[in-house]
Image (spheres, coloured by chain):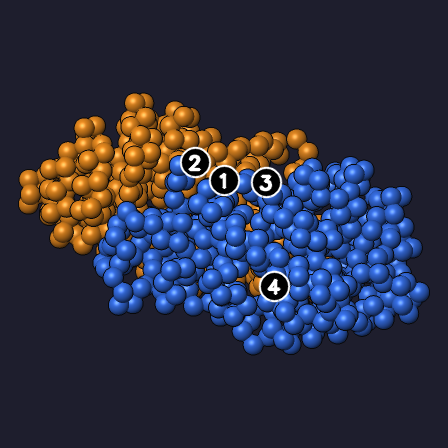
Chain colours: A blue, B orange
Amino acid sequence: MPEPATPYLRVDLKRLRRNIRDVADRASAAGVGVRPHVKTHKSPEIAQLQLGAGAIGITTATIGEAETFSRQGCEDIFIAYPLWLDVISARRLRDLLGTTTVTIGLDSAEAAANAGRLLGDQGLRVLIEVDSGQHRTGVLPRDAGRLAELAARCGLDVRGVFTFPGHSYAPDKLLSAAKDESDALSDAAASLREVGIEPEILSGGSTPSLAAADTDVLTELRPGVYVFGDAQQWELGTTSPESIALVCRSTVVSHAGGRLVLDAGSKALGADRAPYATGWGRLLDHPGARITLVAEHHAVADLGENPLPPIGSTVDVVPNHVCAAVNLADHLYVDDMGEVRDWPVAARGQNS
Amino acid sequence: MPEPATPYLRVDLKRLRRNIRDVADRASAAGVGVRPHVKTHKSPEIAQLQLGAGAIGITTATIGEAETFSRQGCEDIFIAYPLWLDVISARRLRDLLGTTTVTIGLDSAEAAANAGRLLGDQGLRVLIEVDSGQHRTGVLPRDAGRLAELAARCGLDVRGVFTFPGHSYAPDKLLSAAKDESDALSDAAASLREVGIEPEILSGGSTPSLAAADTDVLTELRPGVYVFGDAQQWELGTTSPESIALVCRSTVVSHAGGRLVLDAGSKALGADRAPYATGWGRLLDHPGARITLVAEHHAVADLGENPLPPIGSTVDVVPNHVCAAVNLADHLYVDDMGEVRDWPVAARGQNS
């Protein structure tokens, strides 16, 4: 195919395969399952690579993502979210259950009663969400048993507990977040046992904390970003530029004021900027450069004393947060040893 | 239609019409044209409301946006971007020129020579971009004449000058940015006259600086955000909650840790957060509340001492930057006095 119009997302298939294999191999050696979060790539082709490498199922954030991947043959899906169901979303889940093993997240008595009322007759599978330190969602580990007991009384099938150690996204927190994750899941599992529920699944995992995950405690890992890597992982030290498998190829459109201005703005890269990030993205081939200003259709890069690539040339930008960048694109352009193929971002925008 | 699944973008048609009419009336009274930037709404229905209220044409950021709106009958389009053309994009512009008056931006000798080579035979219309203080793209005002002269020699039809006073996006810069805009366009116009080119168009405008725009100098205004308003404009004091015409309706999914957790995350709201922003978005009906944490599918709101809306209820979030939120959605759900209609975000993701 001809070179797509910039800005576009370009995937290095060799690196992608290697990233998938590396995590699969490490998990296999540790005897823990991998259930990748597909919100990162939203691409059935990549899910198939993950399942082919031994993933035990997939993770989604929404029913819409689960529907997309179920249609493409994924048979075991965990929706890692404390869903609030209404009549329509319950009907969508019921339809999914016809072909697919579906588990959802739960972190409140209200949602347990509601899900039980709508889908208790299906014995809907749930995992109790616990807060391991990110302070976003999830009950305290010691409260997991009480909620599990209530959920079971509502007709739900409690299979275990899960957490997202999102506080691992900080330069000095990778190890401690993995410890928090392990402690929270252990304590929550003990709390379930106290009410007579044996947890089969202790699910955790984030890309930054992956290497430190306590595989003696966790039964499955749910990393997402590891398939591609991004500037956040680069800056956290959990990937290297040589492993980054997705870039936004962009064109130099201006040298105004001696600046390097690219056509990849926040509508292609996303606007994520974590407190520890040194810019709005990085350039794969200029490790010292930083994106210092991002507008919807402009990225301004500081290359220090280096000469500016000419107007009209292309530059590969590493987005800060690859999940956000992918969700802006309808297609991934996949470079397989020089031959470029178009993989649809099939679940793009599936927020419900 | 049934209530769409949350999170979804809900537009108040009455407020939208009023916002469009207010700017149209003020511009008309001042004798200046309005050429709205449609990157904000990406919706042909809204462009038709703007044209119906007297807009002299529309502004886009990309050829793809221009194609979408041209197909819907917009006949006069300014692509306010220093496009770098290749053979394919030049062919797309040539096709557009068959039905539509198209003008593009220009800020470098390289792009002038390139556009002249590819489309000089069409007498392609251009406006010279000048930097009025944002320091993103654009030549210095005094250099506009030299670039205009070169562009004319390359076969391009130089119609005037434009700027985006994007430094108006700061609490104390609204007035001074409007003054900078006026000065830069005046100086650039003088620079064009020095080389014998009479500028017909002096184009400026941003939503924050709109009320202060110097309509004695500017011939047209290109605001975008004014149609909806957003939390940025609310915090800059350029709109009030009573005028905000777009919200992201979201569901309360958790009260974990005493927090209000909504299902509208950065994949629905965007992740924009300007230095002056007090959070990642605001709640329309709780002016004191702030979004204090945003993840892809979660927003955590701080309501202070106020009671939390119950799990399962809905809350209307005002995104920080409405252009980013709209570009994440495939549909706008438009509330016309209680009846809800679905308007497609027809140019969503048209980044090229």
N-terminal-most mark, 1 or 3: 1
Out of A188 and B233, give the one closest to the viewer. A188
> Helix or strand or loop: what does disc 3 sit on?
loop
Q: Residue furthest right?
A: A196
Query: From the viewer's perspective, is the residue at label 3 or at label 2 nearer?
Result: 2
N-terminal-most mark, 2 or 4: 2
Out of B23 and B344, give the one closest to the viewer. B344
Report the amino acid beneath label 1.
Arg
Q: Which residue is pictured at 92% across the width and 55% down the height?
A: A153
The image position of residue A86, as x and y in percent, is: 76, 43
Check disc 2 and report the residue beneath it: A1
Q: Which circle marks residue A341 in the picture?
A: 1
The CA span between labels 1 and 3 is: 15 Å
Check disc 4 and report the residue beneath it: A207
Q: Residues within 10 Å of mark 2 (few under 14, many from 20)?
A: few
> Helix or strand or loop: what does disc 2 sit on?
loop
Q: Is residue A84 visible?
A: no
The image position of residue B194, as x and y in percent, is: 6, 45
Check disc 3 and report the residue beneath it: A346
Tell me, yes or no, whether the two marked residues, 3 and 4, touch with CB atoms within 8 Å: no
Query: From the viewer's perspective, is the residue at label 4 or at label 1 nearer?
Result: 1
The image position of residue B307, as x and y in percent, is: 70, 61
Tell me, yes or no, whether the two marked residues, 2 and 1, touch with CB atoms within 8 Å: yes
N-terminal-most mark, 3 or 2: 2
Q: Which residue is pictured at 77% across the width and 70% down the height?
A: A217
Q: Give the chain letter at badge 4.
A: A
Q: Is residue B114 above or below residue A183?
A: above
Report the amino acid beneath label 3.
Ala
